Amino acid sequence: MDSSKFVHRRKPDIPVTLFRPRASDKNQHIQEISVKSLELIKVIRLLEDPLTANLKERHLFVLKKLLKRNQIGFLLKDLTGIAKILNICAEKVTDHPEYVPVLCEALQIWRLPFLKEKASDELNYAQDVIEFLSHMGCLMRVPDAEVRQHIVESVKSFYSCVAPKQLLDGLQPTSPGYKLQLLERSDLAQTLLLSMAALDNQPAIKLQLLQTLQILSSSSDMNCALILNARGAEMICLHMNEPDLSGQVLFRSAEILWNLLERGSEEVTAQLSSMECIISLKEAFCHQLMSGFRQSDLQLRNDLLVITTLIAENPNSLLIESSFAKQLVVLFTFPEMKSHNPLVHNLKLTYNNEDLKMKKLLLNLLVLMSKDLGALQLYKEESVMLVLLTLVKLPAASSEPRSASRQWSSVQQEELQLQALAALSTLAPLMLDDYMSCQGNACLLLILDWCVAQDALFGQGDTGERGSKKAQMRHCIRVLRSVTSVGEDSVHLDLCDQGTINQLLGILMQMEASPDEEDVVTLEIKSDIQLILSALCESDMHRKELFGSEGVEMAVHFLKKGSNNFYSGLGHNKLILSTVDCVWSCIVGCYTTEDYFLAKEGVSLLLDLLSSSPRCLHCNVLATLLELCDNPNTLSYILSWRDGGGQTAPSFLLQLWRDEEEELRVSRNQHGGISDPQRPLLSHYQQEDTQRSFPANVQSAAVLELSENLRSKIYSIFCKLGFQDLPGLSRKHHVTLSIVRRYLDFKVGEVWEEISRELSLDGVTPISPDKEALSTICKVAEDTARRVAAEQNRILELQEKEDIGEEELMYTEIKSHWKQRELTAKSWDSYVSKTSNYEILKEVKAQREKYLESSRPNPKHEDAAVHLTEHFIGKVMSVEKTDAQGPAGVKLTLARAPIKAAGQDEVGPTTQDPEYFSTVSVKE
């Protein structure tokens, strides 16, 4: 309201003027507001006082005057009094209908926003507002139709924008969402729901009430919770089939149930699972099925079917007991199977999208109800498996043709085919007899042939590409995987007799040869095909031979891909696991395929995969390698393997052992040796369960540990390889190898120790011989651990001695190197001093001549003079300097000339040219 406008109520003859209100005027409004509160107390006293309780005319006059003063909205602080006045009026309406207009006018004002004097009033009077809203809902007890209609319309008006009327100064409307927030905390929604029972004779108001409940349930989770607390889902379901010419009651009821299911499905399905509710749903669905022809009717029919589907997820639902399930199964078989059931006798489908949705919903419902054995019996009686396979068949092989206007289109038929295949993957393993009697395997194999054909035009599927049949292949392979996973030999035999192994191998390699990029669907198909092959060949030697060289090449091809894309998120992890499983199930155990696998470097590929794959894959790969070790040709391939860093297979397996023990937090010293002889193998997790006793039918921790980690498999592989003369092992590996060698002895001692501990925990005292035997066994195990620890210490001491010897040799080499450098430096210094100081050169020359004189022999006989001695003098011919430092930087060229002894000339003159030495360089 514009604060410059003020209306003088007491002097109407004075025109309205525009001016700013004075402080006295504001005080006057505040006084008027206070007067209102006093008037409320007086009105309540007037209505309740026995002396004035029958003054109806005075009551009406005062009430109308009160409502006129509140025509712009109720004050927050007055709501408690207003609620009390309206409740008194509601009690008087039964005997005095004159109070009805008062209630209607009050409800009309209720639509307006509440008024506040201060900003804090919204918080201070929140509880009063909640109670006021709850009281207004209780006015639905008034039997007058006009009052009830005003209540329902007022609640609906909360969700629309109602502009406040012109306000007095000092008053402000509450925030737009204030009333809705507090409505959720009141009992208004619950009260409106409970009032439905009183509206049987007022269908128009009941319809409006359903519309209001639909708005309430769609806007708030708290409103839905309030409705469900009053068992609203059950109440709505039980009343939705009441006579209604407009057809809106069923529609509104279904919408309310939808809203409740979206916000609290478990509670809703629990309420709708009663026999009465399911019968009501059945009646509504059958009515819409037989009499609904408009688009909205068909949509409502499908909505009811969706609600039924959600109820079917509840294991306590009574769909079968209420015979609703039988009617739904009969409806599913129509029109593929002829039936004399009245439900479908005169039923005609239009084959539009709504009918397609109904068919797909029925397929989904079959899968959900299959958890009940009673439903499976219904499926057998109504030939559900035959109908499913009819829907699955190819277009050219489908059932007898219908007229062009009465059949599914090609796109609709493909959707039904995919949905039927998806349902078969669940139902076929549960109905194997029906599946085999209807020749399900042959039907699926024909579809696979069609999927890999090059000229088929039908098929778009869920891949988004026209002409693509990947979706059909995916679902078909899923069905085959589900039926083979049951382990029924008759199914396996039937598939193998039809050449399934070779057909699947051909499909797999054809997909590998395709240039298309791998996606989630392609990888799923490949892994599922490998799982099917594993299931077919696992327990039959002849089928492993059929797997043959083509299958081995397929497995080798996938092993070569490695585990680089293991965490790609597309499914490479599943493909790697299925490949390893395929090797285990289809190759291991048949010597012809094993030898071919070995010749194709299969063992090396498995070891490469083991070294590069994450830890979660190690158990499967090691188990496969262990099974292959039964073939004597395998050992040479394992011992000759090297990884990228040159590590051998034994050293790699020992490193895996150490990593596994580190993961299990086994007690070891810094060198990987035994630190606690009493617990040589015990992991940290087993130590935490030492005070726990296991039942007789439960495996103990010591036994369960064998299958949960890699140590038992590594030990078994070493038992095949042997423990002596293994290539590529260091002293560190020998320390670990000493533990691996005694693994079985340690494990036996650990099991007996566990038995002794559990007997003690159970309070069982063994007899003396048994007690002595237990003590001896435990002591032997401990002594074995101590001997292994001593052996490890000897290995470490020998390693330490070798390290010391190598260290001394290294220091000797270093010392010799430095000595050589010192001699070289000294020689260089001497050479420099001779060339730079002439006196030193003369002194050296004199010493050399003296040495030569002293070294000459003195002739003792005359004949000695005849023997001539020839000496040589070296002469420096040239000196060159290079870039190297020290003596290495000087390059000399020397020449030699013979020196003749006395008397040599008499023998005969000889001449000899100087002989040049080879050019050399002075080096260190």
Image (cartoon, rainbow, N blue to C red):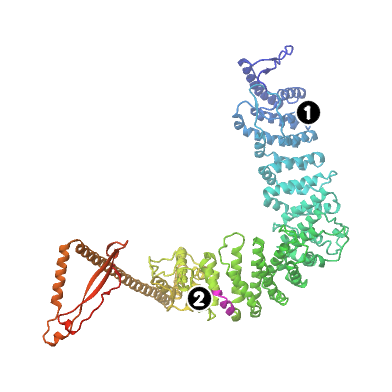
Residue 602 included in the magenta stretch of the image:
yes
Within 10 Å of disc 1 (Cα), the crowding (few <14, some 14-19, many 20+) is: some
Is the magenta region chiefly helix, strand or loop? Answer: helix
Question: Can you tell which quarter of the image residue 373 is in?
Answer: bottom right
Which residue position is annotated with label 2? 638
Quadrant of the drawing holding the N terminus: top right
Residue at mark 1: 101
Residue 8 percent across, percent down from the top left? 70, 15
Q: Is residue 870 left or right of residue 295?
A: left
The quadrant of the rendering that contains the C terminus is: bottom left
Residue 691: within the magenta? no
Which element carries disc 1, helix, strand or loop? Answer: helix
Residue type marked 2: Ile
Q: Position of residue 902 (x, y in %)?
A: 14, 80
The residue at 20%/81% (across/down) is 909
Q: Is residue 921 above or below residue 72?
A: below
Magenta residue span:
594-603
